């Protein structure tokens, strides 16, 4: 079956699944890339094997007039440094990740949307597999970086990848455009996303279902509504991913009470360790949009707490790097204090729902 088409300024390019018959042409394409584009940045021992990436979950070629002019694949594996960063940043186990790799387009066919089409095809495949899409790109490949960012991929961080017999390679690691959007919409940077009724820029219900991983147990989270002495509320935004305005919170560990968890999460995420629990506001069941949280954690019980600072906050705004068990920065947050009325408008619906309870709690200090 013929796949999607990138209608270029010159000839039409079709994307289809790769077959073994494509491998010799792919190897030739890789050879010209190596000479003219310096890709891959570290010359592999066996270029044909490198580009074909044996063990790939799926691979696609772009074809024009019967000639292979582009390629991408989806791999279950990648450099340990890349997978480690993605796993930590996204909270997704390695076996739920899929790496989009070996994206190349022949020079005469560039800037005609071919890579964008290949990338969208790979992304759809990753979602169909129920995995979270990530990729890595050498920090000097400016064209590829522009392409990924234009297509809505979000940078998670940078790693230095060890390569045997060569200099280590500095790379950026990206997560696919699945949202982490707070408003329940997921832009995919792919105009075909509306096919099943989603409307432009909105992931269709069919695709969302493909992304969802069912987990028999609800994920238990503790969330902190921290107010300062003037009644303002503490909120934050992620600095590296667009995830909207939130209040601090996180998973309750085994053996930990919800109250212990809310204080620990607040300290880890914001650095604030002097807040006092006023009261528990309540518990609520909620299902997060798939793609907004790591797969498998969509169904949640939220334990909401009102906490207060005894003294005026030391900073009006501050940045905090969340690290877990070492030097690796998992998330970077920017915190600020806002009026409770504003919080109601800017927080995720599942967090805004507690704002009335915060108002009530402020009127009745413990
Ligand atoms: C990177 C590469 C795959 C892009 O392929 P392509 O088919 O030309 O990309 P597209 O036409 O789909 O580009 C889509 C958008 O990405 C951005 N983009 C792509 N190449 C770009 C470049 N060289 N400079 C700046 N922006 C670029 C543009 O926004 C472009 O849209 P526009 O043409 O309307 O401005 C191709 O240049 C290539 O094969 N490079 C060598 C191999 C490589 O670096 N692979 C990436 C490995 S991680």
Image: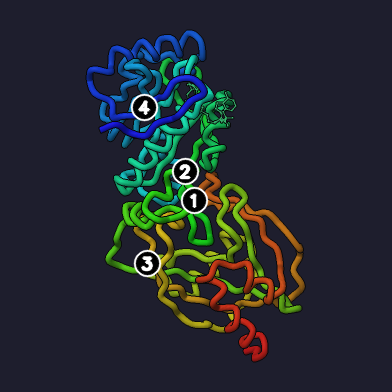
Q: Earlier in the sequence, mark 2 or mark 3?
A: 2
SS of the residue under disc 4: strand
- Circle 3 is placed at which residue position? 299
Q: Earlier in the sequence, mark 1 or mark 3?
A: 1
Residue 279 % position (x, y): 56, 84
Q: Earlier in the sequence, mark 2 or mark 1?
A: 2
Residue 15 % position (x, y): 35, 29
| Labels 2 and 1 touching (C-beta < 8 A) | yes
Q: For the residues carrying marks 3 and 4, which lies nearer the camera in this image? A: 4
Q: Which mark is residue 191?
A: 2
Q: Toward the viewer: 14 or 170?
A: 14
SS of the residue under disc 3: strand
Residue 79 % position (x, y): 40, 31
Residue 288 % position (x, y): 43, 64
SS of the residue under disc 2: helix
- Circle 4 is placed at which residue position? 14
Q: Residues within 10 Å of mark 4 (few under 14, many from 20)?
A: many
């Amino acid at each position: 079956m013929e796949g999607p088409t990138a209608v270029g300024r010159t000839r039409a390019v079709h994307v289809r699944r790769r077959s073994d018959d494509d491998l010799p042409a792919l190897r030739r394409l890789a050879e010209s890339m190596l000479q003219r584009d310096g890709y891959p940045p570290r010359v592999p021992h066996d270029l044909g094997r490198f580009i074909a990436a044996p063990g790939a979950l799926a691979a696609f070629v772009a074809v024009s007039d019967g000639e292979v002019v582009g390629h991408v694949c989806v791999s279950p594996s990648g450099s340990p440094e890349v997978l480690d960063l993605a796993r930590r940043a996204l909270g997704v186990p390695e076996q739920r990740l899929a790496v989009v790799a070996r994206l190349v387009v022949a020079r005469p066919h560039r800037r005609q949307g071919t890579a964008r089409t290949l990338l969208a095809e790979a992304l759809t495949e990753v979602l169909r597999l129920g995995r979270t899409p990530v990729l890595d790109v050498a920090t000097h490949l400016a064209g590829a970086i522009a392409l990924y960012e234009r297509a809505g991929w979000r940078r998670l961080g940078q790693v230095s990848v060890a390569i045997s017999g060569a200099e280590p390679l500095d790379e950026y690691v990206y997560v696919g455009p699945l949202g982490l959007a707070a408003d329940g919409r997921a832009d995919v940077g792919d105009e075909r996303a509306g096919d099943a009724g989603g409307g432009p820029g909105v992931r269709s219900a069919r695709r969302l279902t493909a992304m969802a991983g069912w987990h028999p147990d609800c994920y238990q989270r503790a969330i902190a509504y921290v107010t300062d002495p003037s009644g303002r509320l503490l909120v934050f935004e992620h600095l590296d991913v667009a995830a909207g305005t939130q209040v601090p919170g996180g998973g309750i560990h085994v053996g930990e009470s919800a109250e212990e968890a809310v204080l620990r999460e607040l300290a880890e995420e914001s650095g604030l360790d002097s807040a006092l629990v006023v009261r528990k506001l309540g518990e609520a069941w909620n299902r997060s949009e798939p793609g907004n949280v790591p797969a498998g954690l969509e169904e949640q019980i939220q334990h909401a707490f009102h906490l207060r600072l005894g003294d005026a906050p030391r900073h009006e705004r501050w940045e905090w790097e969340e690290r877990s068990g070492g030097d690796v920065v998992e998330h970077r947050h920017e915190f600020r204090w806002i009026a409770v009325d504003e919080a109601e408008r800017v927080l995720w619906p599942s967090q805004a729902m507690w704002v009335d309870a915060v108002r009530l709690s402020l009127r009745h200090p413990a």
